[in-house]
Amino acid sequence: MTPRPIPLARPNITKAEIDAVVAVLQTPHLSMGPKVPEFESDFARFCETRHAIACTSGTTGLHLIVRAMGIGVGDEVITTPFSFVASANCVLIEGAKPVFVDIETDTWNIDPRRIEAAVTSRTKAILPVDVFGQIADMNAIREIAQRHNLRVIEDSCESLGSRYRGRPAGSLGDVGVFGFYPNKQITTGEGGMIVTDDDAVADLCRSMRNQGRDAGGGWLAHPRLGFNYRLSDINCAIGIVQLRRIEEITAVRSRVYGWYKESLADEHRIALQKVSPHVQISWFVFVVRLADRYTQHDRDRILKTLAARGIGCSNYFAPIHLQPFYVERFGHKSGDFPICETVADRTIALPFHHELTKADVDFICHELRQLL
């Protein structure tokens, strides 16, 4: 048992974020005030895009994007089964069908070599996910999209600060989206951001996040169906400070990753996610994959024991296609996407945050080794 519990994740909050929130609370502008456009402007500059649209989460951002692109009933979107469920749910919400394509064995991202075979006359977009901060092979994906006149939606909810061939995550497709849940590289408590150079998509997303209002329209004028997906000034005040600190935050996360990599360097019973040579990664989580001889039962036993010893841990991810409502609706079954299932059955997310010391990491790795 560890002398103190080691949580899986912790937000990196300083007095600067606290002071920024207090300053907003001392104004009448708790929502729809000046901090929202300030955060959006800073974020667009960071991502090198013309537009950034703040919203309540990465999930609501994805929903707005799918809807703004006119994707709906009868349409299909090609995506990965190895992701958080929201990346597929946002397609399903609009009545379209998520069409899954298996992943690469080493990067754990969607395999571009398998995408083209999944394209049909109903396909409208490809939705790659930057898994754990590793940006998907966007050049290959864009080439396929161009051949078939498809849109590319980059789910960058886990990759803020990563770069692909020198370009920032989120800027590599037609539109990108980020999430700011407390375990992400930066947080706003809850929140998300859409980034794009597409003026029409940006305008529609801005309108629909604000109950379907148009810029300059009246409070009770709603030209289109919309939602309350607005992010408050309180959240944006946190985000402004966090974004200014991102190099500091990601440097600490990289250092913790380095400690893990060093401590597990000679451990052949596990594998780490491969980082493409074209990617400068900003780590979201630290996940190991057990060797093939281990079963899902073995993995679950390890998770249970680590947790009992005070070490935060989790499986990461469960295959989306095997979630009960996907099985019921689409008839998916075990074996449909064998690489995804093989990886998902054997992943272990270990504690990953700024408060970890090298001694913590060495202890965690020692305990993991004892259970292998």
Image (tube, rainbow, N blue to C red):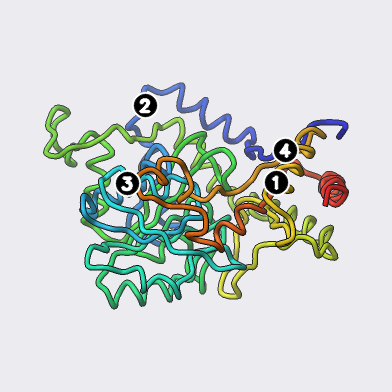
Precedes in sequence: disc 1 or disc 4: 1
Sooner in the amino-acid sequence: mark 2 or mark 4: 2
Identify whether 33 is placed above or below 342.
above
Marks 3 and 2, how far apart at CA: 35 Å
Q: Residue at x 22, y 33 (%)?
A: 211
Within the image, what quadrant is residue 277 found in?
bottom right
Q: Nearer the viewer, mark 3 or mark 2?
A: 3
Pick whichever of labels 2 and 1 is earlier in the sequence. Answer: 2
Determine whether the residue tagged by mark 4 lies in a helix, strand or loop.
Answer: loop
CA gap, disc 1 and disc 4? 18 Å
Circle 2 Cα neighbour tier, 10 Å, few/some/many (<14 / 14–19 / ≥20): some
Residue 42 location in percent, x, y? 43, 50
Circle 2 residue? 29
Instruction: Tell me which amino acid carries mark 4.
Output: Gly
In the depicted structure, whether residue 285 falls above or below residue 301: below
User: Disc 1 vs disc 4: Cβ atoms closer than 8 Å?
Assistant: no
Circle 3: residue type: Leu
Q: Secondary structure at mark 1?
A: helix
Q: Earlier in the sequence, mark 3 or mark 2?
A: 2
Distance of label 3 from label 1 (alpha carbons)? 31 Å
- Foreground label between 3 and 1: 1
* Tag shown at residue 312: 4
User: Which residue is pictured at 27% across the width and 68% down the height?
Assistant: 120
User: Eyeballing the image, is 125 above or below 324?
Assistant: below
User: Disc 2 versus disc 1: distance between alpha carbons?
Assistant: 52 Å
Q: Is residue 18 left or right of residue 72?
A: right
Residue position for label 3:
92
Q: Nearer the viewer, mark 1 or mark 4?
A: 1
Could you tell me if the residues under marks 2 and 4 are in contact, i.e. CB atoms within 8 Å? no
Residue 136 spot, x, y in % from top left: 49, 66
Q: Residues within 10 Å of mark 1 (few under 14, many from 20)?
A: few
Residue bearing mark 1: 297
